[in-house]
Image (cartoon, grey):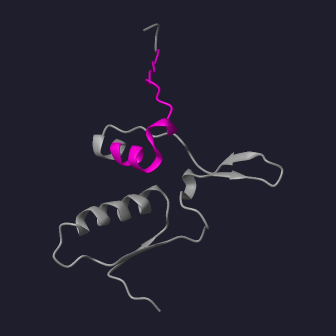
Amino acid sequence: MESVDILIVGAGPTGLGAASRLAQHNTKLKTPLDFLLIDAAPEAGGLACTDTTPQGFLFDLGGHVIFSHFQFFDDLLTEACGSDSWNEHQRVSYVWMRNR
């Protein structure tokens, strides 16, 4: 059995973010922390994945919409997925009530 300082369970966006942040902080520590990222699935992504059936149909497992106002988070996603992996849309919504 392997022993680590920190065990991250789940390789979805949160687990991947935790591992990335630990890796960044480890470069600044005198004694880096050992960490291990594990997931039950064979690929990372968690509920942000798209599954393909044997017939070739695609199914999104969770929501694929990200509303972020944090540049650090945006930069992390771009680093992980590449800048050409995103569709950006300006969100606009209105609520009409009593003709206004």
Provide residue 9's location: percent of width, then percent of height.
46, 71
Is 80 colored magenta in this rendering? yes
Give the tally of numbered discs. Answer: 0
At horizontal 54% and vertical 61% (from top left) the residue drawn is: 44
Of 26 and 18, the residue lying toward us: 26
Residue furthest bottom in the image = 1
Of 99 and 5, the residue lying toward us: 5
At horizontal 81% and vertical 55% (from top left) the residue drawn is: 54
Q: Is residue 63 left or right of residue 52?
A: left
Residue 70 vs 4, above or below: the answer is above
Is 69 colored magenta in this rendering? no
Provide residue 27's location: percent of width, then percent of height.
22, 67
Please state, as top left, top right, bottom left or bottom right, where the C terminus lies in the image: top left
Residue furthest right in the image = 55
Residue 78 in which image quadrant: top left
Over which residues does the magenta segment extend? 75-96
At horizontal 49% and vertical 67% (from top left) the residue drawn is: 10
Of 34 and 6, the residue lying toward us: 34
Provide residue 13's location: percent of width, then percent of height.
46, 55
Residue 69 in which image quadrant: top left
Residue 22 vs 58, above or below: the answer is below
Provide residue 34's location: percent of width, then percent of height.
32, 79
Q: Is residue 59 left or right of residue 40?
A: right
